[in-house]
Amino acid sequence: MNKDQAIHNLDSVIARVEEARLKLSHHHIVKIIGISKYSTANDIKTLYEAGQRAFGENKVQDLKQKSQELEELPLEWHFVGRVQSNKINNLIDLNPTLVQSLDSLELALELQKKLEAKNKTLSCLLQINSAYEESKTGVMPEVAIQTYKEIQTNCPNIKLKGVMSIGAHVEDSSVIKKSFETTKKIFDELQPLGAIYCSMGMSGDFELAISCGSNMIRVGSTLFK
Ligand SMILES: *Cc1c(COP(=O)(O)O)cnc(C)c1O
C-alpha cells in the first residue's frame, strides 16, 4: 500500500463514517480502529502517516511483533481476537489500550489473577454473541448484564469500558441490524455502570452499525486494501 492509496482509503472510510454518524447526531462520535491483522508493519506505518492512530490485531504474537516494530510511533493498540489461556501473560505484558474480546467470566477470572500478580490493570470490552452464532465467542445477550456486573465485582484489575459484537454473518441486513440492536440495548443498560464503548461494525456493515448506535468500528479490509 502506498501513501496515496492509504490516504484514499482512510478518507473514504472517514467520509462514510461522517455521513452515517451525522444522521444520528452531531454529537455522536465514532472511533475508527484499523484492524491490521492481514497487513504488515509497513502498511500500518503508511496508514499512520495518513492520519490513523488506533490499530487492532487478533493474535497475541502479531500484536507483539507489530507493536514492537512500530514502537517509536504514538499508536494505540487494541486486541480483538480469542484470548488463549497460555497467552494471557504475553498479552498483559504488551499493555494494549483495549482488549475488546473478553468473552466469558472464566476468562475474566483468569485475567484477574494474572493482573493482580503483576499489579496491573487492563481495559476490556465484554464481547456479546448477539448473532447467536456457534462459530462466535462471547456471552449470550440474556446473561450479558449479569456477567458484566460479576466481572466488575470480582475482577477489580479489569476496567470494563463497554461491549463488543460481531454482526451476524448473513446477507440479510435486517438480521444483521437485529444483532446490532441487541448489543446496543445492552450497552444502554450498562452506561450507568460506566460503559462508554459500543464496538460494532466492520468493513461490510459499519454504516449499519453506526445507525444502530455504534461508537467504535473495527475496519480491516476496506482500510488496508
Ligand atoms: C478481522 C476483524 C475485523 C475487521 O474485519 P474486516 O471485515 O476486514 O473489516 C473486525 N473485528 C474483528 C473481531 C476481526 O477479527
Image (cartoon, helix red, strand yellow):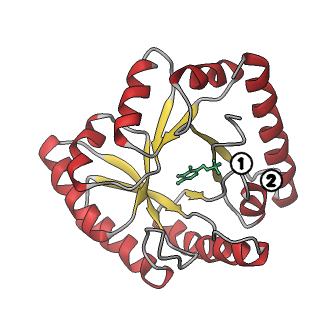
Q: Decide which of 202, 210 is in the foreground and name it.
A: 202
Local secondary structure at mark 2: helix
* The disc label shown at residue 29, or none: 1
Up the image or down, 224 lies above or below 218; here it is: above
Report the residue marked by disc 2: 21
Residue that protrudes farthest toward the top in the picture: 72
Give how far apart the Cα atoms at labels 1 and 2 are.
Answer: 7 Å
Residue 85 image point, x, y percent = 23, 55
Up the image or down, 71 lies above or below 162; here it is: above
Local secondary structure at mark 1: loop
Amino acid under disc 2: Arg
Q: Decide which of 41, 140 is in the foreground and name it.
A: 41
Callout 1 touching callout 2 (CB < 8 Å): yes
Residue shown at 47%/61% (left/top)?
Answer: 194
Characterize the local packing of mark 1: few (<14), some (14-19) or many (20 or more) Cα atoms within 10 angstroms.
Answer: some
Residue 198 image point, x, y percent = 59, 60
Residue that protrudes farthest toward the left in the picture: 117
Residue shown at 67%/59% (left/top)?
Answer: 214
* Residue 43 falls left or right of residue 22: left
Characterize the local packing of mark 2: few (<14), some (14-19) or many (20 or more) Cα atoms within 10 angstroms.
Answer: many
Q: Quadrant of the C terminus?
A: top right
* Residue 173 falls left or right of residue 184: right
Amino acid under disc 1: Ile
Q: Decide which of 8, 191 is in the foreground and name it.
A: 8
